[in-house]
Amino acid sequence: GINAEYGKQWYQRRVRDIGFRGVQQLVKNISENPDREIGDYRVLNSFESELQRQVTPMLCFIDGMYKLYSTSLDPIVAARSYGLGLVNQLPFLKNSMLDRARG
């Protein structure tokens, strides 16, 4: 249905955003260490650590959303629709969840 299709599109956009975030972080780490080679372990280790800190919360959220939208079981679809409707009616909760998901 339309909810499932929206969920998949949302998921795809978040995965793309994570890829862009990774490129930005790598460029930042390389530019902050101009005296080191691009493949230097310390540069790459710093990049990996920072990227994991930024991305892990988003990946967990994406995984949960993907699982939520992957099912067609009526009770779960009904609960999902009710919950999303409730969150949509409470802007402070919706904004808080979005801020947290963005990292």
Image: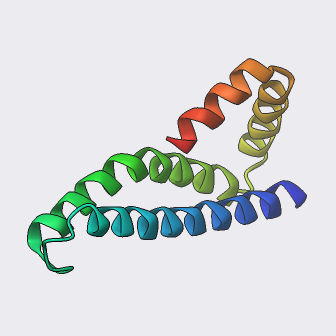
Q: Is residue 90 left or right of residue 31?
A: right
Residue 30 location (% of width, % of height): 27, 69
Q: Is residue 34 left or right of residue 11?
A: left
Q: Is residue 14 left or right of residue 95?
A: left
Residue 42 location (% of width, % of height): 11, 65
Residue 38 picture quarter: bottom left
Quadrant of the image for the N terminus? bottom right
Colouring style: rainbow
The count of marks equals 0
Q: Is residue 50 above or below residue 90?
A: below
Outermost residue toward the front? Answer: 35
Q: Residue at x 61, y 60 (%)?
A: 14
Q: Residue at x 75, y 34 (%)?
A: 79
Residue 29 picture quarter: bottom left
Q: Residue at x 84, y 54 (%)?
A: 3
Q: Is residue 94 above or below residue 31?
A: above
Q: Is residue 1 left or right of residue 97?
A: right
Q: Is residue 52 above or below residue 41?
A: above
Q: Residue at x 45, y 65 (%)?
A: 24
Residue 86 or residue 35, whichever sits in front? 35
Residue 87 or residue 82, whichever sits in front? 87
Residue 96 location (% of width, % of height): 63, 26
